[in-house]
Image: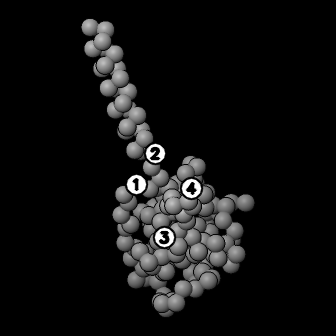
């Protein structure tokens, strides 16, 4: 009987370790959600280096929704990270922060063959990226 009890305990432990281990994967199999940017002014096809929607309330509202659907899983609700990814409330404001943001948004981040952030530029588009950035600036903290 003792052996069966130990085997049951080991089996239960294996199940727990497997389920916890799989939930620790940063991104898993995530499908980006489309963002409706039709209410935003067109900005052309060429990638801009500075946010054309800075201070635009409509863009910030669209960006908040886009962030919640596509970024919050790793960067945290309301842009407050729990440690998996950078806390985006601390991004520099203005053009210097735009430069870092759009580079990461377009190309993602990977090191030693591991993807830490998937590239989102081609998936969600430039307008969605700048809308997200416009919203993030409303959440800024020093």
Q: Earlier in the sequence, mark 3 or mark 1?
A: 1
How crowded is the residue under tag 1: few (<14 C-alpha within 10 Å), some, or many (20+)?
Answer: few
| Vertical arrangement, residue 43 with respect to residue 130, above or below | below
Identify which residue, 21 or 66, lies in the foreground: 21
Q: CA distance from mark 3 to mark 1?
A: 14 Å
Where in the figure is residue 26, as x and y percent of width and height? 47, 52
Q: Earlier in the sequence, mark 3 or mark 4?
A: 4
Identify which residue, 51 or 113, lies in the foreground: 113
Where in the figure is residue 107, as x and y percent of width and height? 53, 73
Location of mark 3 (residue): 119
Where in the figure is residue 120, as x and y percent of width and height? 47, 71
What residue is drawn where x is 37% and y is 37%? 18
Location of mark 4 (residue): 85
Residue at the limit of the structure toward the front, as seen here: 112
Q: Which mark is residue 59?
A: none
| Vertical arrangement, residue 69 with respect to residue 10, above or below | below
What residue is drawn where x is 31% and y is 19%? 7
Image quarter hosting the N terminus: top left
Would residue 132 be visible to someone looking at this image? no
Mark 1 lies on a secondary structure that is: loop
Q: Which mark is residue 24?
A: 2
């Amino acid at each position: 009987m003792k052996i069966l009890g130990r085997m049951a305990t080991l089996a239960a432990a294996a199940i727990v370790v497997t389920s916890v281990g799989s939930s620790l994967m940063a991104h898993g199999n995530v499908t980006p959600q489309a963002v409706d940017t039709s209410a935003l002014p067109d900005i052309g096809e060429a990638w801009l280096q500075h946010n054309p929607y800075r201070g635009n309330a409509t863009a910030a509202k669209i960006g908040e929704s886009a962030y919640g659907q596509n970024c919050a899983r790793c960067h945290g609700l309301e842009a407050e990270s729990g440690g998996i990814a950078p806390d985006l409330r601390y991004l520099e404001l203005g053009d210097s922060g735009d430069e870092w943001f759009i580079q990461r948004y377009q190309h993602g981040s990977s090191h030693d063959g591991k993807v830490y952030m998937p590239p989102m530029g081609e998936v969600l588009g430039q307008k969605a990226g700048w809308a997200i950035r416009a919203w993030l600036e409303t959440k800024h903290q020093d």
